[in-house]
Image (spheres, grey):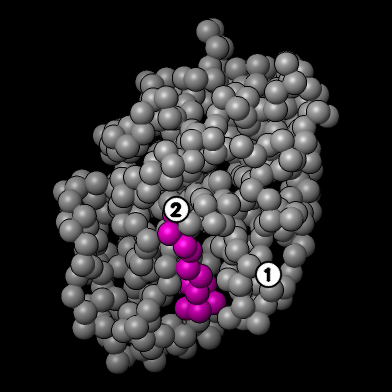
Amino acid sequence: MNSRLTRSLASAGRLGGIAAAVLATVVATSLLPNAVRTEPGAGSGKPSPGGAVRMNEIQFIGAHNAYHRELQGAELAAMMKVDPTYPEWGFYSHAAIPDLLGRQHVRGLELDLLPDPQGGLYQYPLLRKAAGLGPIDDPEMAQPGMKVMHVADVDFNTTCNTLVACLKQVRQWSQDNPKHEPILIQLELKQTEDVVERAGGAVSPPWSEDLLGDIDAEIRSVFSETALITADDLRKPGRTLEESVLRYGWPTLDDARGKVMFFFDNGGPGAIRDMYLKGHPNLEGRAVFTRGNPGSPDAAITMVNDPRGANQAQIQDLVERGYLVRTRSDEPLGTVKNQDFAQLEAALSSGAQLVTTDFPSVGMAARWDSDYVAELPGGATVRCNPVSAPKNCRDDKLLR
């Protein structure tokens, strides 16, 4: 935590120690940096059987924290009294999901989830109490189910408050545009912070096998099996998921049109991934892909957040081998204020299929006198992947 922020919090007596302690935690957490033979066409840059382009042979833009809306009015005033640096990390707001997919042409959405098995756990955030406001006015917040927000009790404004509500928006847009390219939905599983809990805020239950199963159930309550791309669709008899993907390849783009695919942000060895894989080592029956390390049976999609430097070669290698990779094009807000396109250029040239941004549309950075925008050349929705696309791939043939 920097000295300026420490001084800001130290002088925050007007809003009370609770809000100051909560906000200190928020800023500290929010600013953190977040050998199988391949058949031709499975990610090698060679033509796929029949000349069809596969879904891992394209590139597209995604929205980081796609649900996020910055604080406004009394909430913002309360935040600024205890943390004047909030604009440095919280001043970005996305369009509603249908507009992200339609007018802004993104094909990746990131949603942060907090468990709420009883309902009502996050309905009355500490910051709203400090601002003299009432609970969040949304009856869905009182119901059991996964909630969507950046940081409980503090940075909680969203365009859709629950996982089911967000997914229903995706489903409606998908049904209205049935030939769309596959939509990748990244799920980051979060919990409340210790300092927030001690200050009197919400205390989220630890993630468990039952709660992870609830995520599957909520996804399948919205999407039919034919609308999902799951590990069961890719895995071949007698093969692990990783072997199946790297040897036989991903579905063709045309077969993947009109569908959605989910993956967990939480990756590598760890309790969440281990619990989700328990009894499902190759994601049998699961609705979400895990972020397995290359060489693991569940490995198919992974993340390399910073595409610059040595990471570029790492991403290119992963893409060439047949993995799906997500990377980032910017970091609030230095990238925007400096109009620094170097990370975006590195992300696009890396071949990572999913490049996520907080600024997917022209004009979003204008409040900082910046023209920064993260988009594909020409503002395209998708393009042939610069690393893995087959020689017969043509950008103008990808859209339907």
Residue visible at 47% across and 26% down in the picture: 230
In this view of the protein, which residue sits in the foreground, 127 or 57?
Answer: 57
Query: Residue 105, position in %: x, y?
Result: 58, 52
Left or right relative to 357: residue 151: left
Give the residue pinned by disc 1.
372
Residue 248 forms part of the magenta stretch: no
From the viewer's perspective, is residue 366 above or below residue 348? below
Check whether the beta carbons of the residues at disc 1 and disc 2 lie within 8 A of each other.
no
In the rendered picture of this protein, how many numbered marks are placed on residues? 2
Looking at this rendering, what residue extends furthest in the top direction?
238
Image position of 338 with respect to 251: above or below: below
Indicate which disc residue 14 carries. none
Q: Pointer 2: what residue?
A: 98
Report the magenta residues as a range: 86-97
Q: Secondary structure at mark 2?
A: helix
Among the 4 quarters of the image, the one containing residue 78 = bottom left
